[in-house]
Image (cartoon, rainbow, N blue to C red):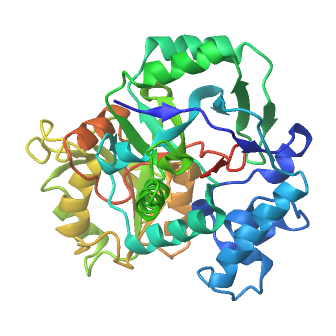
Amino acid sequence: MAKVKPFRGIRPPKHLVEDIVSRPYDVLNSEEARKEAEGNEKSLYRIIKPEIDFEADTDEHDPKVYERAAENFKMFQEKGWLIEDDKEHYYIYSQTMDGRTQYGFVVAAWVNDYMEGRIKKHELTRRDKEEDRMKHVRVNNANIEPVFFAFPDNEELEKIIKEVTSQEPEYDFVAPDGFGHTLWKIADQKLIDKITEEFDKIPNMYIADGHHRSAAAALVGAEKARNNPGHKGHEEYNYFMAVAFPASHLNIIDYNRVVKDLNGLTPQEFLEKLSENFEIEDKGVNIYKPSRLHNFSLYLDGRWYSLTAKEGTYNDSDPIGVLDVTVSSDLILRDILGIKDLRSDKRIDFVGGIRGLEELKRRVDSGEMKMALALYPVSMEQLINIADSGNIMPPKTTWFEPKLRSGLVIHKLD
């Protein structure tokens, strides 16, 4: 069962929230963070991307960079830019994009649930990325940024969302990207107990986004337990911060591919090879978006094509075989274009659907890329099926939007 608890969040005062909060550390590079934080000493990037306080060529993994994160975190608290709540709370965090709002609970999730597989993953993690975030958690003794969970819908928790969100929020603002962010603090002890009780009925939670942060937070918690001779099991380090959303609230958007060459084929030869496994329809010069599962959009030589996978090229009864990312990776990228490892092959790049299909067209028209492939997005049901069956999704399958804003709440490990 999903064990969660309330915690004493460290948060910005209401009048400073928009100065402090930021995008997550992993959606922008050091240069972009430097630019966004320019002239703003209160930006959370000074804690989550502290290399921006150094010369531009400073290695972000230099020990002095991690030390600066801890110094800045301490300084933010000393200056009153981040203040710890006086008692343990849950929080409800909502995000609004394109007129659609999703509501999640900010909770402290149990490390053991991650270690024992009740918090399920659908992606492989890289040890170097885990190690980077572990150092960041250790040096700050805190989860500065939350991870993003989904859980099966629960009627009682939906009622609590309705009740709490009818009240005055702690924060309510629109970020520079146009997405709305609102946070409510839950102070009523009966509601707090009810949330803990309802989560305890939920068999599993699922990592939607933030696999490296989840791994790092859980591994540091487990490490602290091992290193504490007086470990009891209820210490704060046994928990890490997550925002958990009912699965029906979430929307996965498409994650598309652009490729630098056609592996020695002419466009005509490439289309002929595609026709072995796909029904091809020339859609002309207007952008074509995939309309359903097993339908793809190809942009090549200034024209858009609809590709529909033929019967027998996919397996709808297999959680991995049903995925369009599997169909395209095997039948197009591997078999025709010779791209076998999506993680390391330099001939391919990935474009989140938030940028729109215009971005695919731009990258091909510029001559940087030869062709683009747009995929129909994965569903939450598919993600949960994969995690439940113990499978791992192919790389670059899911793109969640909007991203969680960092800095709304921080969780200390003591």
Task: Give coordinates of residue 311: x percent, y percent.
Answer: 10, 41
Q: Is residue 241 above or below residue 141?
A: above
**As drawn, is 285 to the left or to the right of 100?**
left
Front position in the image: 33 or 286: 33
Task: Give coordinates of residue 341: x percent, y percent.
Answer: 27, 72
**As drawn, is 205 to the left or to the right of 403?**
left
**As drawn, is 334 to the left or to the right of 94?**
left
Which quadrant holds residue 41? bottom right
Front position in the image: 88 or 350: 88
State the residue at coordinates (76%, 66%): 46
Q: Is residue 112 above or below residue 226?
A: above
- Could you tell me if residue 137 is visible in this image? yes
State the residue at coordinates (38%, 69%): 126
Front position in the image: 118 or 38: 118
Q: How many marks can you see? A: 0
Task: Give coordinates of residue 284: x percent, y percent.
Answer: 43, 50
State the residue at coordinates (79%, 69%): 35
- Could you tell me if residue 288 is visible in this image? no
The residue furthest front is: 230
